[in-house]
């Protein structure tokens, strides 16, 4: 294996290890995000996209080179030439095997390189979503607590208003009863006053009649005295 394909194979093995570690379920997305936020990664962040695109271009070139080699050693003309010479046939199959191996190595390296970039992106998104979810959950818990507190305060206020309404209603009923009692007392007093007025009017009429009768009797008494005085004078 040449030096470049040895490097690609090592790169492929490293990608397999890194992807397996990224997919390890015991390491949470928050830990990966805290790891990605180390200061050392910020030094390489300006060159990360360039390195990523450069590696893609290198792997694409190696992949198409491997495809070319596979097509070269698997063409019918080459196979026909190899059948004429047994030594050439074994050498041709060895070259074809190496070309296919290089094709698989470069293809899987390119595929895993894209997959690793996507996994890292998804891990960051999951960590952010989890953090936002935790914040939203905390806000929801706070909102639920506030709603519960407001409901309790509202219930207390309703109970206080209900108690105040009951007190007001009791006072209103008591005042109505007092007004009814006062109305009955006033009606009774008016009845007493009316009866007193009737009795007073009767007493007035009776007094007037007695006065008239007294005046009549007094007049008669005066007349009788005058008659008696006249008779006395005649007897003398």
Image: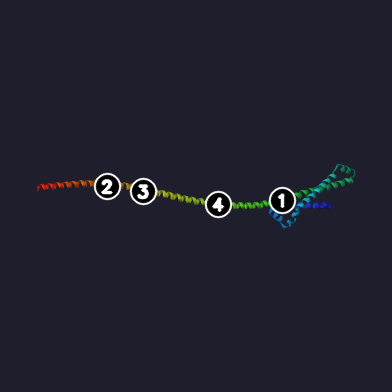
Q: How far apart are marks 4 and 2 (CA)?
A: 77 Å
Circles 4, 1 touching at the beta carbon (< 8 Å): no
Q: Residue at x 15, y 47 (%)?
A: 226
Picture coordinates of residue 163 (x, y %)?
Answer: 48, 51
> Of helix, strand and loop, which one carries label 1?
helix
Q: How far apart are marks 3 and 1 (CA)?
A: 93 Å
Along the polypeptide, which appears first: circle 3 or circle 1? 1
Q: Are marks 3 and 1 in contact (CB under 8 Å)?
A: no
Q: In this view, does 11 lie to the left or right of 213?
A: right
Give the residue at mark 2. 204
Q: Distance between the residues labelled 2 and 3?
A: 26 Å
Q: Name the residue under label 4.
A: 150
Q: Which of marks 2 and 1 is nearer the N terminus?
A: 1
The mark found on residue 121 in the picture is 1
Image coordinates of residue 228 in percent, x first then y, are 13, 47
The answer to whether marks 4 and 2 mark residues whose Cβ atoms lie closer than 8 Å is no
Q: Residue furthest toward the left?
A: 236
**Looking at the image, is mark 2 or mark 3 earlier in the sequence?**
3
Which residue appears at 79% of the width and 49% of the height? 57
Mark 4 vs mark 3: in front: 3
Q: Mark 3 points at which residue?
A: 186
Q: Position of residue 191 (x, y in %)?
A: 33, 47
Could you tell me which residue is drawn at 30 percent across and 47 percent down?
Answer: 197
């Amino acid at each position: 294996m040449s030096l470049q394909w040895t490097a690609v194979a090592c790169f492929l093995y490293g990608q397999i290890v890194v992807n397996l570690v990224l997919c390890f379920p015991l390491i949470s997305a928050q830990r990966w995000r805290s790891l990605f936020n180390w200061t050392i990664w910020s030094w390489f962040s300006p060159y990360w996209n360039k390195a990523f695109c450069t590696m893609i271009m290198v792997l694409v070139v190696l992949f198409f080179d491997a495809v070319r080699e596979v097509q070269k050693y698997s063409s019918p003309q080459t196979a026909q030439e190899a059948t004429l010479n047994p030594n050439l046939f074994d050498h041709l199959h060895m070259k074809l095997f190496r070309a296919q191996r290089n094709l698989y190595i470069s293809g899987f390296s390119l595929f895993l390189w894209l997959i690793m970039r996507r996994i890292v992106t998804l891990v960051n998104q999951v960590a952010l979503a989890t953090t936002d979810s935790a914040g939203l959950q905390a806000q929801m818990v706070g909102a639920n607590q506030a709603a519960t507190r407001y409901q309790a305060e509202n219930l207390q206020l309703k109970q206080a208003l209900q108690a105040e309404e009951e007190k007001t209603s009791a006072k209103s009923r008591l005042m109505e009863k007092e007004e009814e009692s006062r109305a009955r007392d006033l009606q009774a007093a008016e009845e007493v006053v009316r009866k007193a007025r009737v009795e007073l009017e009767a007493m007035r009429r009776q007094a007037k009649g007695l006065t008239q009768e007294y005046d009549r009797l007094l007049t008669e008494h005066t007349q009788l005295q005058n008659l008696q005085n006249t008779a006395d004078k005649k007897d003398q």
